[in-house]
Image (spheres, rainbow, N blue to C red):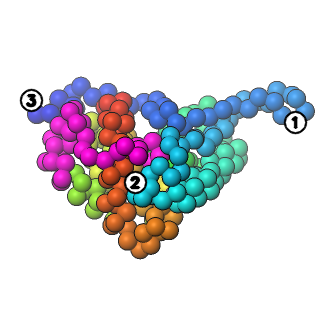
Amino acid sequence: MKKRDFLRLSGTVAVGTMMIPMISCKTGDKDSNGEAKKVSQMEFELPDLPYGYAALAPAIDEQTMKIHHGKHHAGYVRKLNAALAESKGYEGNSLEEILAKVDPSETGIRNNGGGHYNHSLFWNIMSPDGGGEPSSDLAAAISADFGSFSEFRSAFTAAAGLFGSGWAWLIVTNEGQLAVCSTPNQDNPLMKNVSETTGQPILGLDVWEHAYYLNYQNRRSDYIEQFFSLIDWGTVEKHWKAAR
Ligand code: MN
């Protein structure tokens, strides 16, 4: 039996589990009068980085990390909470469940919910000790689905060259296979009503100019190449195992 057939038969459908522990949320407790607030909507919080702002330098410089996390990601979280406060139908949902349901016309939740999810995954799959290639099971799956690590890397690099702002992804498809795709803006493959390709993201690369322009200016391809020196394949493998 070929590996992908085995995956299709044995794969479980990932439900809305919190596969990324960094995405935390809280529920309201008291308002300014000390009255218990109605717990109708979760409030999302900016996760801390799992390393210092300078830890990924020189591949990603300290100032870019500070602005990217402290301004851009923080802004997505703030605007997501504001959009959810104005919306109905998402009470008690995890971020993954919200993204799976979001309608293309709900731009506040689509853009900022995507922004929060995408950046949380992005910080999570990089490490100052990253780089190299995945080992063992994930390496075998990449070879089975792409031919080789080198072919995966080429496909991912091509996806990251999308026109304009967006993200490149390595996902686990609904059939349990690995696939590469890209999405524009802050869309992602969890958005069943939005994204052409859907699945569970296990690795993502931000190619908005705010992610690299201070250090790389227009040299996006250099930034993509350096990103490979930061990928924490152990964490990616954990996401892969949780997703299939
Ligand atoms: Mn970004």
Question: Considering depth in this image, is 214 or 73 the residue closer to the camera?
Answer: 214
At horizontal 88% and vertical 29% (from top left) the residue drawn is 34
Q: Residue 77 has which mark?
A: none
Inspect the image, locate mark 2, and give the three-letter code of the amino acid beneath it: Leu
Which residue is label 2 attached to? 205
Q: Which residue is mark 3?
A: 1
Q: Nearer the viewer, mark 3 or mark 2?
A: 2
Amino acid carrying label 1: it is Ser
Foreground mark, 2 or 1, reads 2
Does mark 2's beta carbon lie closer than 8 Å to ligand 1? no
Q: Which residue does the image show at 72% across and 29% down from the upper left?
A: 39
Q: Which range is magenta?
A: 122-151
Query: Does 218 appear above or below 194?
Result: below
Residue 110 on the magenta segment: no
Residue 125 highlighted magenta (yes or no): yes
Q: Is residue 195 above or below residue 97?
A: below
Residue 216 seen in this snapshot: yes
Tell which residue pokes out farthest to the left in this image.
1
State the image coordinates of residue 193 (x, y, percent, origin top left): 45, 49
